[in-house]
Image (cartoon, rainbow, N blue to C red):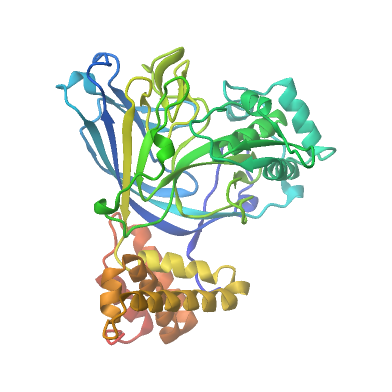
Amino acid sequence: MLCNWSILLFSLSLAPVNLALQAEIIYRNPRVYNVDYRFELSPDPEKINRSEDLKLWIPVPREWDSQKGGKIVSVEPKPHAEYEDPEHGNQILYWDFGKEPGRALYAVNLKYRLKSYEVQAEVDPHRVGPYDQASREYGLYTRSTHHVRVTPRVEELARQVIGTEKNPYLQAKRVFDFVRENMRYKLIRPRVCADITCLLDSAKTDRETGEQYYEGACAEQTTLFVSLCRALGIPARGVTGFTGWRPWMKEKDLKLRSKYHTKLSPDGLAATRQYGAFGGHRWAEFYLPNYGWIPVDLTYRNLQFGWLGNYRVIVSKGTDVIVAPHAPQGDSEGYGDQWISLHDGRVDIIGWGVWNIKKIRIAKAKTLHHSDPFPTDAFTEYLSNLDPETKANKQLPLTRKRILMSIDDAISDREQAHVSLRSAYRDTPSLRHDQQVFICHMLREVVRDEKFSDIVNSYQDMCESSSEPVPTARFQKVAAEVYGQSLNWF
């Protein structure tokens, strides 16, 4: 093995767990996110009631199996209250701007840091244990809710999907395949069908084949998967987060990600206008006794059943989430998230933030993130080419070729014969990232595999034991100590 850049974590909810089997869910190759998040509200003072319409709830990332080292660095202004969702454990901050002087724009600035791990679940269907159906968690994640309704119609569809299959892991795989084959990706904005009943009622018919299919994006795909799993007695839940990786992006680069987010729903509900490095995303998890929570992403096409990449930040889990003890109750009171209003104090998805989407038509979420000092990101990117080891000899040359072509393109674009690599790296931030990945490859060539593995593991131990980013100088010192001689020339 070239390196041990991985950890094994265990999920102990729902049922007694055999730890020897649980180790088959592997969490490895962490990617560090240092996030700057800004949420802005721009109300029309003529259309709002200051005592009622200026409340804001924002979920903040917490630790999960695949997300560790979470730390809130700063929050401005200080929230008026902090909540923990009593069902799923989501962390939520609350502001009431009606208590402050009137202004044209109200803003929250949030900085946090975390590590996002790649997840690989290796499941033997014969080793899946029985569910503890009397447990609180089993009831929570198999229940019928406002948006994930387990109706006789959903139960019948679920039975058709699985046929005679009895194993819950293989049942979930058949549900996964069904959603992928029968749901066509379509970004429908504003969101029209947030719940499973509406989604099934809106089925389309292919004019050429006569086959029935459904339409929707990540949220709708997840709703269909979770609903069918719950109808089969398989605990399942949605996961909401941000995806993306552009640490070189600066504030001057911020642009509206999609004009869709400026549109109002037929009911006059608004959405958060998104700027920056991240896009919102929704995926799913289902639970297996003796293993834990298995990730499922129905949107991306490669290796997404039991595998999850590290290009994401989890901000909440669950569907029909309790926003806070004092959130508006009932239907159509105006508060909600992304065109979907609250229902009995619950929101379908809590991601960017909950505010009065009926009266405050302009809300903006701006996200940037930056890297830890070299070689944090570079190691993460480079080591992904070494896993699995059987494919490393093929993946590394392809990565090397891509990086060299990027360098060549960056120089050619300047149409200057005298342009230097140094200036190319300076002027093309994304190219600097590739350069650092290539430095890791050259270091491995110099010190050879065994010592490179020792350097990686020593650096990993140093990162795990430190609450702060590890400076490059400390890494250089450790690398020289492991190598046994100075690397200053390198």
Above or below, 470 against 94 in this view is: below
- Is 329 located above or below residue 278 in the figure? above
Quarter holding the C terminus? bottom left
Residue 252 shows in the view = yes
The image shows residue 5 at horizontal and vertical percentages of 47, 65
225 to the left or right of 48: right
User: Where is residue 423 shown, x and y percent of the image?
Assistant: 25, 76
Residue 132 visible from this viewpoint: no
Residue at 43% x, 69% y: name it. Answer: 457
Look at 51% across and 25% down and name the residue there: 320
Find residue 63 and report its image quarter.
top left
Q: Quadrant of the N terminus?
A: bottom right
Q: Is residue 346 left or right of residue 234?
A: left
Q: Is residue 28 above or below residue 225?
A: below
Residue at the outermost right position: 164
Judged left or right of residue 53, residue 203 is right
447 to 429, vertically: above or below: below
Number of marks: 0
Q: Quadrant of residue 273?
A: top left
Task: Describe residue 287's horizontal placement relative to residue 273 as left or right.
Answer: right
Identity of the residue drawn at 75% across and 41% down = 171
Residue 162 coordinates in the image, percent (x, y): 79, 38
> In percent of the image, x 25 and y 72: which residue is there?
473
Tell me residue 330's x, y (percent). 46, 12
**Viewer-nearest residue: 119 or 199:** 199
Residue found farthest to the left = 101
Residue 149 placement: quadrant = top right
**Residue 116 or 183: which is nearer the viewer?**
183
Residue found at the very far front of the displayed protein: 207
